[in-house]
């Protein structure tokens, strides 16, 4: 019984040896005793599987082949996973951008900069400033073709999409890719409304996402007609017009309720590029765009072929009322002052100005007609005009030849040399130092440290009264008076009367070399017209909020008396002779007593005339923006012509009044002007106002007012009077 296991073990050992011999090349391993075989079998680990032979690839295990899925299945699976994560990421971005928006209920009445409506003195609208220019007009009150025009050209599927137009986006993408530039946008009207109402104009991914969120919200909150209503009353149409009502008033001089089909097509075409297509600057481009709108409306069966043909045959035209006019200069000046008068605006406000529309239009026409007729002949390209009443209220203000071409305000902002128009301040200073209109001074060459100012004609009249010297604009007498009283005293007088610009206190100020503005020169002449009361030129009368609350009311404050009435009367006595026998004798204002002074700067660069009556003061300047010389345009020709036209209009149906001083002598204008201490000169012997003839540079201003060598020389040898 026990031998059978021994035999089995021996057979197993034999098998092991045979196997070992095969692996070792055929040599049989040494035989082990039976007991050691049993121990070796117990300690020996199970044999490892044989290594694969070289040159033969082992086939993959059959279980691993079963774990591999088809390639298409894996692609679908990972695509689904990635798509899911993409949707989650997009939702997260949208949720994040939406979280940065204010609560939707606060967007119902969007915040916007206030509208400032500028009115004339009679309550008529002059201009509108601000981001919301027009009163909202309900869509039901508009002609049916007006909203249809916007849908036809801006968003054909407006009534079918949900705020986002995938087809339009795809078409725009293809167009932009094929043209390799941004030629077409895919925004819907709802997206455009969202951008105009609530967002900035920056082009960023964040803003586009917010635009999409708001568009979806608008589509959910409002009906299609309500969205279109909001859009038409908010979108920008160029030339400062926001909303379809403001645009219709701006371009066609009528309400949006009354626009024709051709005008509606033009309005719809503007929103694509309002700054470039504004009819005020590109009427032809606006008409061409309107033709595209009409074609789109016809293709979509919104209008008939006959309607389209009639509108194309008579394209919309810019009305006279819609053209940019000089009132733009007034409105801009008003806006510059609003912060000082009112501070931060609480909302929409209405500003009533002192401007008279009839006088503003008369001044605009006079300047435009004169430059059109004679501007090329005299080499003059620009002009400016300011008219004040004797309280300093601005009745007309023209800042340039064309507001559409240039918004630079030459009446308020520009500074130019006044030439001889500055001389009244010198003569007033002389009167305040004890001289009179009959005081005699020598018209003869004068020289001071190499500086030799002369009359432009090089002719000299010898002893003349101050009245004659001012009327004929004699430069030598003006220089003598300036040296006599001192340049600093002249500067102080000009500042006291209303000149705000910096004035150099040197002898050359006698020739008007320090630059001033048209507005301040007009205001500085006003005390002559009202008997010596200083004024602050002003254009704003009242400012009221939308609910009628008065935010500002002019109280009429001013500097008070700046000139003794006796000196005002003397100055009027002298300056009336400028119009009677002097350089402004071409001025024409029948029946009215008027006074003033012409001025022409060096090389005929600036031509001035400032004239006044007991009712109005008007200052006119002509020249070129680059200060290039004109072709002998002087204060005696074109400025006097413009002044006469405007002042005739201003004095129609106005009771006649005399200038302070009660001057009444037979002669000029029916009321006339005498010349104390002298006689009338024949017109042919009176030179026109011309630039001074100057050799050398004016000496530097004296540091002290007391006696100097120059002052002693003038007083001793030129007959200078003593200070009073």
Image: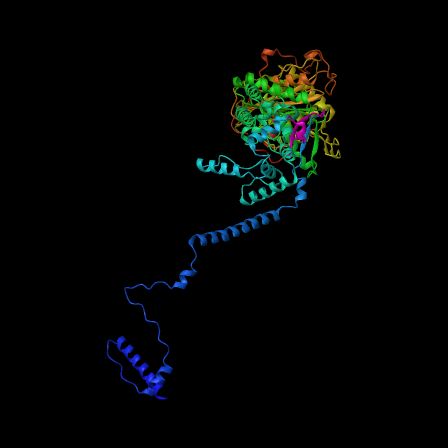
Task: Find residue 42 and report its horizontal and vertical position in percent.
Answer: 38, 82
Query: The N terminus lies in which quarter of the figure?
Result: bottom left
Placement of the C terminus among the 4 image quadrants: top right
Q: Is residue 256 magenta?
A: no
Q: Can residue 472 be seen? A: no
Would you place residue 158 above or below residue 529 in this image? below
Which of 597 and 63 lies nearest the eye of the viewer? 63
Q: Position of residue 209 (x, y in %)?
A: 56, 44
Q: Which residues are magenta?
A: 121-143
How many numbered marks appear?
0
User: Does the rendering let one see residue 176?
Assistant: yes
The colour mode here is rainbow
Q: Residue 143's image quarter? A: top right
Q: Residue furthest left?
A: 26
Instruction: Name the foreground residue: 286 vs 678.
Output: 286
Where is residue 606? Give x, y as percent. Answer: 56, 24
Query: Depth check: 663 or 451 in front?
Result: 663
| 129 in the magenta segment | yes
Q: Is residue 675 left or right of residue 687?
A: right
- Where 319 sits versus 80, above or below? above
Q: Quadrant of residue 325?
A: top right
Residue 569 vs residue 286: left or right? right
């Amino acid at each position: 019984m026990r031998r059978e296991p021994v035999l089995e073990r021996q057979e197993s050992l034999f098998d092991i040896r045979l196997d070992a011999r095969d692996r070792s090349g055929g040599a049989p391993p040494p035989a082990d005793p039976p007991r050691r075989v049993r121990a070796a079998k117990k300690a020996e680990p199970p044999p490892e599987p044989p290594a694969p032979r070289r040159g033969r690839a082992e086939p993959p295990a059959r279980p691993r082949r079963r774990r591999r899925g088809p390639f298409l299945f894996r692609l679908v699976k990972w695509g689904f996973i990635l798509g899911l994560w993409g949707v989650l990421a997009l939702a997260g971005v949208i949720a994040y951008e939406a979280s940065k928006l204010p609560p939707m209920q606060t967007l119902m009445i969007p915040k916007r900069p206030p509208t400032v409506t500028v009115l004339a003195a009679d309550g008529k609208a002059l201009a509108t400033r601000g981001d919301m220019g027009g009163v909202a007009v309900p869509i039901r009150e508009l002609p049916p073709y007006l909203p249809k025009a916007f849908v036809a050209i801006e968003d054909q599927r407006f009534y079918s999409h949900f705020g986002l137009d995938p087809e339009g986006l795809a078409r725009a993408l293809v167009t932009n890719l094929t043209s390799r530039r941004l030629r077409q946008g895919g925004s819907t009207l709802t997206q455009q409304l969202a951008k105009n109402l609530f967002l900035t104009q920056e082009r960023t991914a964040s803003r586009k996402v917010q635009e999409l969120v708001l568009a979806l919200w608008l589509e959910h909150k409002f009906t299609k007609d309500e969205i279109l209503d909001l859009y038409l009353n908010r979108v920008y149409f160029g030339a400062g017009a926001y909303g379809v009502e403001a645009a219709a008033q701006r371009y066609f001089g009528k309400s949006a309720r009354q626009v024709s089909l051709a005008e509606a097509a033009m309005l719809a075409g503007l929103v694509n590029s309002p700054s470039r297509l504004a009819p005020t600057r590109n009427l032809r481009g606006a008409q061409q765009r309107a033709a595209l709108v009409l074609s789109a409306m016809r293709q979509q069966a919104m209008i008939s072929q006959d309607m389209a043909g009639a509108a194309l045959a008579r394209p919309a035209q810019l009305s006279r009322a819609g053209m940019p006019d000089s009132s733009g200069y007034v409105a801009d000046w008003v806006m510059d002052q609003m912060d000082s008068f009112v501070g931060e605006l609480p909302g929409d406000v209405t500003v009533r100005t002192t401007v008279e529309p009839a006088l503003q239009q008369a001044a605009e026409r006079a300047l435009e007609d004169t430059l059109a007729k004679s501007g090329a002949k005299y080499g003059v390209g620009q002009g400016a005009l300011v008219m004040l009443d004797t309280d300093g209220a601005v009745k007309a203000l023209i800042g340039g030849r064309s507001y559409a071409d240039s918004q630079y305000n030459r009446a308020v902002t520009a500074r130019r040399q006044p030439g001889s128009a500055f001389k009244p301040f010198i003569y007033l200073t002389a009167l305040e130092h004890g001289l009179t209109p009959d005081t005699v001074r020598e018209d003869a060459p004068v020289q001071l440290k190499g500086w030799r100012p002369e009359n432009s004609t090089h002719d000299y009249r010898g002893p003349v009264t101050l009245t004659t010297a001012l009327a004929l604009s004699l430069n030598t007498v003006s220089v003598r008076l300036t040296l006599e009283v001192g340049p600093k005293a002249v500067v102080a007088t000009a500042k006291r009367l209303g000149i705000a610009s910096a004035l150099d206190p040197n002898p050359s100020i006698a020739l008007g070399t320090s630059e001033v503005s048209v507005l301040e020169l007009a205001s500085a002449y006003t005390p002559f017209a009202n008997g010596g009361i200083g004024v602050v030129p002003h254009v704003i009368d009242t400012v009221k909020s939308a609910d009628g609350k008065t935010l500002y009311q002019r109280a009429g404050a001013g500097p008070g008396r700046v000139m003794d009435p006796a000196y005002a009367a003397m100055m009027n006595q002298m300056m009336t002779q400028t119009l009677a026998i002097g350089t402004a004798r071409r001025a024409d204002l029948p029946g009215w007593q008027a006074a003033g002074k012409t001025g022409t700067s060096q090389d005929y660069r600036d031509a001035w005339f400032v004239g006044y009556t007991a009712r109005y003061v008007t200052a006119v300047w002509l020249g070129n923006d680059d200060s290039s010389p004109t072709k002998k345009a002087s204060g005696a020709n074109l400025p006097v012509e413009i002044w006469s036209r405007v002042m005739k209009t201003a004095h129609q149906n106005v009771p006649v009044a005399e200038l302070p001083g009660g001057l009444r002598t037979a002669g000029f204008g029916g009321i006339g002007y005498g010349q104390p201490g002298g006689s009338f000169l024949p017109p042919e012997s009176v030179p026109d106002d011309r630039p001074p003839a100057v050799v050398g540079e004016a000496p530097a201003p004296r540091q002290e007012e007391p006696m100097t060598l120059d002052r002693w020389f003038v007083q001793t040898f030129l007959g200078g009077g003593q200070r009073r």
